Image (tube, rainbow, N blue to C red):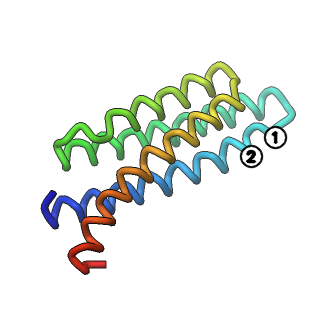
Amino acid sequence: METREAILEFQYAEKMKSGLIIGTTLLDQMASLKKEDELSGGKKVLVWYLEGLLREIRIADHVLGSGRYADLERKVMEVIGRIHMSQFQEAQGSFSEAISLATTTCQAAMNFLLERKLI
């Protein structure tokens, strides 16, 4: 790993992790909606948000050119599918797995940068 690559990977992984944490908060809020029309609208908005996050993941994967974000992309697509099926508990579990994937990617880049005393 080169320094430039580590910096970019650290930046993108932190961005993905932050986006996923926001997504879990949105899921919690959405799941608390009681009226069917509100829940339907909440699901649409959360899916739109996650589709935007997917675009960010694909950009990161393209910039780094490594395929490192393929698992994260699949996991976010799984979250979207679970939301469509109103499987909110399972979606929360998939969110947790996605956050773990982003954290692992971030940790490797951070370790590289720490070893070189860049952060």
The residue drawn where x is 25% and y is 78% is 118
Residue most toward the front? 115
* Total numbered badges shown on the rendered structure: 2
Q: In 3D space, how far apart are the residues under numbered discs 2 and 1 (Cα atoms)? A: 5 Å
- Left or right: residue 108 versus residue 81 is left
| Quadrant of the image containing the N terminus | bottom left
Q: Looking at the image, is 18 positioned above or below residue 30? A: below
Q: Amino acid at mark 1?
A: Ser
The residue drawn where x is 32% and y is 34% is 70
Density class for disc 1 (Cα within 10 Å; few <14, some 14-19, many ≥20) is few
Please state the horizontal and vertical placement of residue 26, each as a whole percent of the image: 66, 47
Q: Secondary structure at mark 2?
A: helix
| Quadrant of the image containing the C terminus | bottom left
Q: Secondary structure at mark 1?
A: loop
- The disc placed on residue 29 is 2
The residue drawn where x is 40% and y is 51% is 104
- Left or right: residue 94 versus residue 119 is right
**Residue denoted by label 1:** 32
Q: Looking at the image, is 119 positioned above or below residue 22? A: below
The residue drawn where x is 73% and y is 44% is 28
Q: Amino acid at mark 2?
A: Gln
Pick the front one: 33 or 65: 65
